Amino acid sequence: MEQDQNRFSPPVRIVVSSRRRRTVAARLRSGVLELLVPSWMPVAERHQWAETMRRRLERRMERTRPSDQRLMERARTLNQRHFGGRLRWTSIGFAEMAHTWGSCTFTTGAIRIAKRAASLPDWVLDYLVVHELAHLEHSDHGPDFHELEDRYPLSERAKGYLMALDRLHSELA
Ligand SMILES: [Zn+2]
C-alpha cells in the first residue's frame, strides 16, 4: 500500500465567507480541501493561502498514512509492556471500517484497525490496539476483559477522547 505515486494531493475549493473577518480556515470535506476566506481578501492572496494549506495537509497525510508495519510494531511493544508478551495474533492491519475503530476475530486471531485511526494521536491509537489485543483472550467486554484493557494506563482518557470525537462527527454530519 506504500506507493509514492499515490501521494495524497487534494483538490482545493475556495469558499468566500462573509462571516469570516480576519483569518482563513481550512477543512477537509469528502476529499476536497475547502478553504474559507474572508470576502475582502484579494484573489491572489486566496490562492497563496490555498497552496500553503494544501502543502500543510499533504505533509500531515504523509505523516499519518496507515502503515501496517507501524501497527505490527505497536502491537509487539504493547504486548511486551502490558501482557508479558503472552498474546498471539495471526495478523494485524489497517482496514476500511466506517462505523467501528477496530475489530478482533476471536476464532482466527485477526486484528483490524480502522484506517481513519491512523491520524489519531499515538496514545489513542495504542489504546485501540490494546483493546483489540485484549479481545484475543476475551471476546466480550466483561470484567476480565477490562482488567486486561486497563493495564494500558491511558485507557480511560483514550475512551473519553474517542467519545468526544464521535460526538463531534455526528454533530457535523
Ligand atoms: Zn471491544
Image: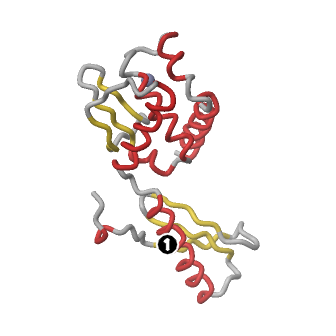
Ligand 1's quadrant is top left
- Front-most of 111 and 87? 87
Give the x, y percent position of residue 125.
50, 41
Give the x, y percent position of residue 123.
56, 41
Give the x, y percent position of residue 92.
32, 38
Local crowd at mark 1 within 10 Å, few (<14), some, or many (≥20)? some
Position above or below: 120 against 99: below
The residue where tag 1 is placed is 13
106 left or right, relative to 122 = left
Please give the name of the residue rendered at 41% of the width and 28% of the height, measured from the top-left corner: 85
The residue at the far top in this view is 143
Q: State which quadrant residue 75 falls in.
A: top left
Number of marks in picture: 1
The residue at the far bottom in this view is 44
Some atom of ligand 1 lies within 8 Å of the CB belonging to the residue at label 1? no
- Residue at disc 1, secondary structure: strand
Position above or below: 54 against 167: below
- Specify the quadrant that holds the N terminus: bottom left
Give the x, y percent position of residue 77.
45, 38
Please give the name of the residue rendered at 51% of the width and 63% of the height, measured from the top-left corner: 60
- Front-most of 92 and 117? 92
Q: What residue type is labelled 1?
A: Arg
- Front-most of 32 and 124? 124
Q: State which quadrant residue 45 falls in.
A: bottom right
Position above or below: 24 against 87: below
Please give the name of the residue rendered at 52% of the width and 34% of the height, measured from the top-left corner: 127
The residue at the far left in this view is 108
Colouring scheme, one of rainbow, by chain, secondary structure, one colour: secondary structure
Please give the name of the residue rendered at 32% of the width and 27% of the height, measured from the top-left corner: 88
Position above or below: 162 against 35: above
133 left or right, relative to 157 = left
